[in-house]
Amino acid sequence: MKLAQALGANALADKDPLPPHLRERLLARDPFFVTSHWVLAGAAVVGVVVALATVRGGPVPRLLRLICWTLAVFMITRSIGFVGWGIVGDVLTLTGLRRPPAEHAELARMLARWDLLLWSPFFLLWGGCWAVAGWRLGRMRRARAAGAPDRQRVLDLLEPGERHRLRRGTGR
């Protein structure tokens, strides 16, 4: 979606939970926001690389694990709402316990609904995926350090029929 927005699409841009002055800049395609779309599209590419690293089985750099855990904490924190937006902030806005400025009250409630039903669950899921990737990368690193053989090397030693059964999880 960020790639599409970087290239000019406005897919769900009007639903971003931003203060009104930033929302206007976003919808007007301000260079700051266009750049942020490109950066986030690049982050998605990094996510693909991390996902491939978790299934490939090669050496795992510590920096990759650090990136995974940092992004997991950021995404989960954002989804819960300790940084302003998120489930807690949305519920406070929708129940009236946190009042937005009167001139933007309806917009704030509409954005809180969108954030509660779309963005916060998305960030929670994405953060969970980053946490699983970081955990898996750490597990792979510990197994390699303990001298466990590389899975692919073990599979290469097996006959094709055995390899197929092992991949399917049926064993012998």
Image (cartoon, rainbow, N blue to C red):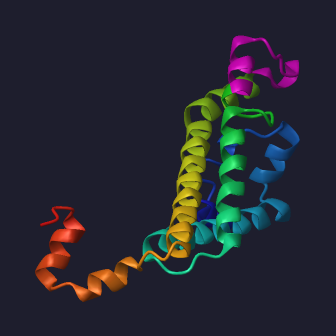
Nearest the viewer among 51 and 96 is 51
Most extreme residue toward the front is 146
Nearest the viewer among 28 and 23 is 23
Q: Quadrant of the N terminus?
A: bottom right
**Residue 56 on image: x %, y %:** 44, 77
**Residue 76 on image: x %, y %:** 66, 42
In the image, is 11 to the left or to the right of 143? right
Residue 172 among those drawn in magenta: no
Answer with the quarter of the image where residue 39 lies.
Answer: bottom right
Res 7 seen here: no
Q: In this figure, what is the number of numbered marks?
A: 0
Nearest the viewer among 44 and 18 is 44
Residue 91 among those drawn in magenta: yes
Q: Is residue 53 above or below residue 69?
A: below
Q: Is residue 34 above or below residue 15?
A: below
Residue appearing at x 83%, y 37% in the figure: 19
Residue appearing at x 81%, y 17% in the figure: 98
Q: Which residues lie in the magenta part?
A: 88-105
Res 83 seen here: yes
Q: Is residue 113 above or below residue 126?
A: above
Residue appearing at x 64%, y 34% in the figure: 115
**Residue 129 on image: x %, y %:** 53, 53
**Residue 142 on image: x %, y %:** 55, 67
Q: Quadrant of the C terminus?
A: bottom left
Most extreme residue toward the top is 96
Residue appearing at x 58%, y 66% in the figure: 47
Answer with the quarter of the image where residue 104 lies.
Answer: top right
In the image, is 163 to the left or to the right of 107? left
Answer with the quarter of the image where residue 9 lies.
Answer: bottom right
Nearest the viewer among 121 and 94 is 121
Question: Looking at the magenta stretch, what is its main secondary structure?
Answer: helix
